[in-house]
Amino acid sequence: MCTGRGGGWMRGERSGSARLGPAGSLSCPAEPRAGLRQPAMASKLLRAVVLGPPGSGKGTVCERIARSFGLQHLSSGQFLRESLGGGGEAGVLAKQYLERGLLVPDHVITRMMMTELEKRREQHWLLDGFPRTLGQAEALDRICELDLVISLNIPFETLKDRLSARWVHPGSGRVYNMDFNPPHVRGVDDLTGEPLVQSEDDRPEAVAARLRKYKDAAKPVIEMYKSRGILHSFSGTETNKIWPYVYTLLSSKIPPVLSDEEN
């Protein structure tokens, strides 16, 4: 069972907000250098979630948080890809839905994530892609009380442009953007040489409906965490401008492994 909030960390604080600069591009963080100092572990475990619509850059933010603060980055998308090839119960169920062209339902994703979280009861972690719905958030509540929820608020036009230019390597989930993070060879994954695909959901005609669906599902989740005083919202169009605010917030909760300048 996960530990609850309390101890030396702030509780019941007001939701934070940062209003940021003009449109720009996302960039992937640099790889950490050798010889880094070891993290000074906090007196209790930190459990955090990053929320954001498709194209908001939450994967990039999660990678930077994980690298800077020594948290395990737990991606529901990555777990789903692994479970599809692993033969476990959740993977078998998910595959049945995907083969019929259906979305994997809440209860299957929830079962998969609860199994993964049980394996990490003694670790700091950061959730990416879960919870997406109120049902998932309530299931998470039953096993763990969160310390911190970060919500990324990105303008619709920025999201539309990012998603329409996004291509993905299906096997790994690596994401490329043809405008600011293109592959070395157009249409081909940098590491495997395998072809990239554009999701049907990322095609321009589907983006608006996808974003509306996210907003409808996420609204009660955001309101729930806001009412508890653990939601911190950051608004802007550039991950590099949002990141310093996120880093400062996390630094008030857990000792960093890397300084902001080292990212």
Image (cartoon, grey):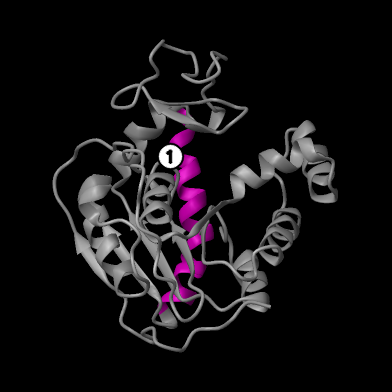
- Which secondary structure dominates the residues rendered in magenta? helix
Q: Which residue is more in the foreground, 77 or 214?
A: 77
Q: Quadrant of the N terminus?
A: bottom right
Q: In the rendered view, does 123 fall on the left or right side of 207?
A: right
Q: Position of residue 193 (x, y in %)?
A: 53, 13
Dividing the picture into quarters, in which one does residue 27 lie? top left
Residue topped by disc 1: 208
Tell me if residue 237 can be seen: no
Q: Which residues are magenta?
A: 205-226
Q: Measuring 14% from the left and 44% from the top, which residue is drawn there?
A: 22
Q: Position of residue 244 (x, y in %)?
A: 22, 57
Whether residue 216 is in magenta: the answer is yes
Against 238, residue 14 (above or below) is below
Dividing the picture into quarters, in which one does residue 134 lie? bottom right
Against 195, residue 76 (above or below) is below
Q: Which residue is more in the foreground, 209 or 112?
A: 112
